[in-house]
Structures are given as structure tokens and as C-alpha cells.
Amino acid sequence: MAIHVQPDVTERVRRGATPPAEWYTSDEVFRAEREFVFRRNWVCVGHVNDVAETGAFFTTEVAGEPVVVTRAQDGELRAFLNICRHRCSKVVLEKSGRRRTLQCHYHAWTYNLDGTLRSAPRFDRQPGFDREQLGLGTVGVGEFAGFIFVNLDPAADPLSTFLGPLPDILAQSGVDPGSLVFERRIEYDIDANWKIVVENYLECYHCPVAHRALVGLIDVDQYQLTGYEHVSQQFVPAAENGTSGRDFYDKGATVQNGSYSLLWPDFMMLFQPGPAHLNVMYTRPVSADRTVLHSDFYFPAGTAQTEECTALVEFIDLVQSEDKVLCESVQEGLSSSTAPVGYTMTHAGEELVNHFHLMVCRAFAEAGLAD
């Protein structure tokens, strides 16, 4: 059964209508997104520094699936389903650590860091026991700018293909990601659907009303919006005579322009005008009406505690806190029984919101759930 509530939903969205309200409130739609969006695309789960040494690992969850990421003995980055091939217990319970092997805490089935089954108690008594067929389920894994992405779809294109223009966009930022170290994470628990959080990020049509400090830093009249197959890009120069952010931005700042990228479905890479830095955000959808947003900050080693960098983090936190209020307001409106079909300003600042809506429609159409 199709999940849309009206015929020709993709065509309506193409003409500027927003998706049906049920796409933001329905548990059925949320389950479909887990299956056909987050389990079929590249999702950021961490940073290479989390598994810098041989034997290091961390566990995570992608669309309800337990995953373990390791740095194997050969130095390669690996990812597996964190599910024992014996009786389907989780193999690793710790969030992170360092091991020579991955041993299941239930019956001590032991796996090498490359996922192969090393041993199982009394396996020699079991007729026809074939260790080669009982390794951990493999998960696609890739790296971009130090960030680790996984993909649960065995038929997925490689991450390098999926990224499209994102490496070039990063190269134009003036910041070398290899020189940056993780400094801080801020989490926002938002009572709103994950798509509302992403849509809010993709436009600054609301900035003059909701972000007075931000419009004192960037020139919102010079916004440039470009949509690619999997990437949505916003570019905006710093304001010539800005009135805010002066404590972390000047004419000699390393980052001279605002650049806000989205890699479908939810990886956000931000540069604000100011000192050398990288702010990365990604969502953890909890339910149809709740999302945890991770906001991670990276700075050159030894600079995070400077006045400029501290002020930059405080500034971005202010903007995100304002956005949390906006997103929750939209969720409340969409949850009303009288919520109308919305209207997108497709030529006046919300082009990338419409681009994102069409990507959601495409994911559902490819799954046979929407026309």
C-alpha cells in the first residue's frame, strides 16, 4: 500500500507543494524512511580518530541496526553488523574500546577484527561446522575528510561516487580537515521530525526574522543555492558591514564566506565566516516526532580555547537553539488535524527545500511506496 494520502504526490511537490503532513507524523512513514532512506544511503557514524589505532572499535546504531566499526590488524577500516552468528546476541556491548578480537559475551564465539569467525567453543564436535560461512555480516564503510560513513545496502554505489561535488566544495573552504581535531559535541533533543530539521537547515528565508545575529554576519541577499544529485549547497559571503560576530570574524579570518552543505540524507557540513574550523551535524531520528541532532566542532590543535573559537561555538549554539524552537513549532502545526498542504518558495530562497522534498519522493518512489 502506498504511504501517500493523495494522488500524484511527486508532481504536486515538483510544483511547490510540501509533502503530506502524514509524512512528518506517521509511524508508518517513519518506519519506511528507516528502511528506504537510512538503510540504503551513506550515513555518518563517527570520525577516524575514534578508531585511529589497530584494534580500536566503536559501536553505533543505524536505522535500528546495531553496527560495530573496527580498525583491523591490517590497518583497514571495517564495519559489521554487531550481531553474533550463533544466537543473534549483540557481540560487543561497550560503546568503544580496543581489542584483539570481538568476542560475544553470551557464548564466547570469537571473531577477528576483519569479521571472520576465529573460534567457537566445542565447534569440533559439531558435524559440518564451517567457520568460513559464519563471519559477521559485512556493512559498507567509507571515509571522507576524516568522517566515517556506513551503508547497509550491499548494492550501494561507493561513497566516492555518492559524494559528488562535496570534496571540491570542501577544498574551496580554505580549511584543511587533516589539520583539525575534535573539540566538542553539542546535542539538541528536538521534538520534531528529522526532515523538518534538515529542511530548516536548507534555507535562510527565515533568517531575517529568526536569526538577527546571523544576518549581521552574512549577506543574505547574496545567497547562492545549488542542488546536485545527493548534495545541496548553500554559499553566502560575509556581510560587508556586519554588526554581529565581530569577536570572531574580521577581514583576515581564515574562513571568509559561509558554506553550508548537505549530503543526503542528513550529513551537514558547515563553515561560518571566522577562524579555521569545521562544524558537522547529523541527525539521529528517534521517532516520527523526535530527533537528536549531533553538532560536532573541529578546530586546529591548540586553538579551541581561544576567544575567537569559543565565541564561534557560542554563536552557532545560539543559532541552533533558535532553530530548535522553529522546528518544534512546525511539528506542532503539522500534527494538527487541520494542517494544510504547505507551499514552498521555490524561486525565493527555498529552492533546496523543494530539492530535498523531491529526494524524499524519489526514495519512496524507488521503493514503490509513492508515485
Image (tube, grey):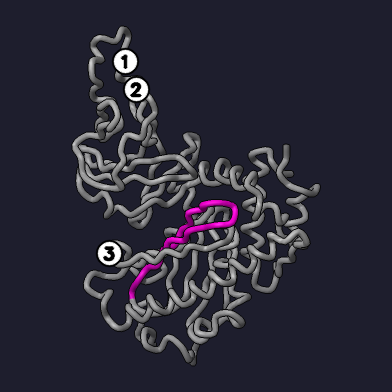
Mark 3–mark 1 Cα distance, whole angstroms, equals 44 Å
Q: Which residue shows up at 64% across the image and 39% down it? A: 367
User: Is residue 337 placed above or below 78 in the rendered structure?
Assistant: below
Q: Residue furthest right?
A: 7
Q: Which residue shows up at 78% across the image and 61% down it? A: 338
Mark 2 or 3, which is nearer the eye? 2
The label on residue 193 is none
Q: Could you tell me which secondary element the residue under label 2 belongs to?
A: loop
Question: How many numbered badges does the structure rendering display?
Answer: 3
Q: Between residues 255 and 26, which one lies in front from this camera angle?
A: 26
Mark 1–mark 2 Cα distance, whole angstroms, equals 7 Å
Q: Between residues 354 and 27, which one lies in front from this camera angle?
A: 27
The label on residue 130 is 1
- The amino acid marked with disc number 2 is Leu
Quarter of the figure that contains the C terminus: top right
User: Is residue 14 placed above or below 213 in the rendered structure?
Assistant: above
Q: Position of residue 292 (x, y in %)?
A: 48, 59
Which of the two discs, 2 and 3, labels the residue nearer the N terminus?
A: 2
Mark 3 or 1, which is nearer the eye? 1
The label on residue 181 is 3
Residue 257 placement, left or right of 232: left
Query: Where on the picture, by quarter, is residue 175?
Result: bottom left
Is 283 contained in the magenta span? yes
- The amino acid marked with disc number 3 is Val
Q: Position of residue 342 (x, y in %)?
A: 74, 64
Q: Could you tell me which secondary element the residue under label 3 belongs to?
A: strand
CB under 8 Å between callouts 1 and 2?
A: yes
Bounds of the magenta segment: 276-294
Q: Position of residue 172 (x, y in %)?
A: 42, 68
> Label 2, on which residue?
134
- The amino acid marked with disc number 1 is Asp
Magenta stretch mostly in which secondary structure? strand
